[in-house]
Image: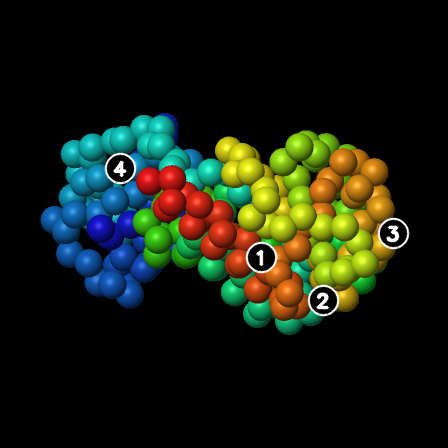
Amino acid sequence: MKLFVGSIFPEIEINSDEQHHISKVLRMKAGEEIHITDGQGNLAKGSLIFEGKKATLQNPEIFQNLPNFSPKLHIAIAPTKSIDRTEFFVEKATELGISEITFLLTEKSERKNLNLERIEKQCIAASKQSLLFHFPKINGLVKLSDFVQNLPPENSFVCHCHENLERLDLLEIPHYQRLTFLIGPEGDFSEKEISLLKSHGIKAVSLGKQRLRTETAGIFIAAWNYENLIGEK
């Protein structure tokens, strides 16, 4: 399947970046079959035609509201000092079917600015690679104290490395239809922040005996969620 991104409604329109990729990079020919998704569960299939320099679909077949088989996983994570590691997390978590990513500002945050447009493009590229028709939602930086206000405590968990504080084992967590995990910076959440989360009913969880990097912890959670999805099938 040759998958590209564009709008489906009110009319099919391939994104400008994809237009360039189709005609100048891939040098595709009229008549080739392609698929267009809007990243919101809608898909169009048809033969490629060119109207002048503009690529579009001829006699498209449209599929609406395609099911999203992945349980809804939201990871709220402090971006790493090295942006490459944050982008690696976004790419791999997207491939594993995450539904939402929020970037956190914490007491020990090493990075307090992000190029959100660049991150969204990488998310889209990873979605296309994995033939996903539902793209993850990417949220910009938000303070931990603000983010926690609207979290449902029954299915929200914080991952931290404080061995002196009570933590659940990851395998003890029931696999809800929607889960939120909070992951701190390289210096971890402070005990004050963990107390704040606990006061809102957010339970702590351990990811094992080894201490994981921030982005590794995020990918670990995404892989755990994906493994549960495969197991259910």
Question: For the residues marked 1 and 3, what is the alpha-carbon distance in whole angstroms?
Answer: 22 Å
Question: For the residues marked 2 and 4, what is the alpha-carbon distance in whole angstroms?
Answer: 43 Å
Residue linked to disc 2: 186
Viewer-nearest residue: 109 or 37: 109
Residue 173 appears left or right of 125: right
Q: Which mark, residue 44?
A: 4
Q: Residue 68, image x and y in percent?
A: 39, 36
Residue under the point 64% across and 65% down = 209
- Quadrant of residue 11 within the rendered picture: top left
Who comes first in sequence, dot 1 or dot 3? 3
Q: Residue 173, image x and y in percent?
A: 59, 42
Who comes first in sequence, dot 2 or dot 4? 4
Who comes first in sequence, dot 1 or dot 4? 4
What's the amino acid at mark 4? Ala
What's the amino acid at mark 1? Gly
Q: Residues within 10 Å of mark 4 (few under 14, many from 20)?
A: many
Residue 85 appears left or right of 193: left
Q: Which mark, residue 218?
A: 1
Question: For the residues marked 2 and 3, what is the alpha-carbon distance in whole angstroms?
Answer: 16 Å
Residue under the point 47% across and 54% down = 223
Mark 1, mark 4: which one is toward the viewer? 1
Mark 3, mark 4: which one is toward the viewer? 3
Who comes first in sequence, dot 2 or dot 1? 2
Q: Residues within 10 Å of mark 1 (few under 14, many from 20)?
A: many
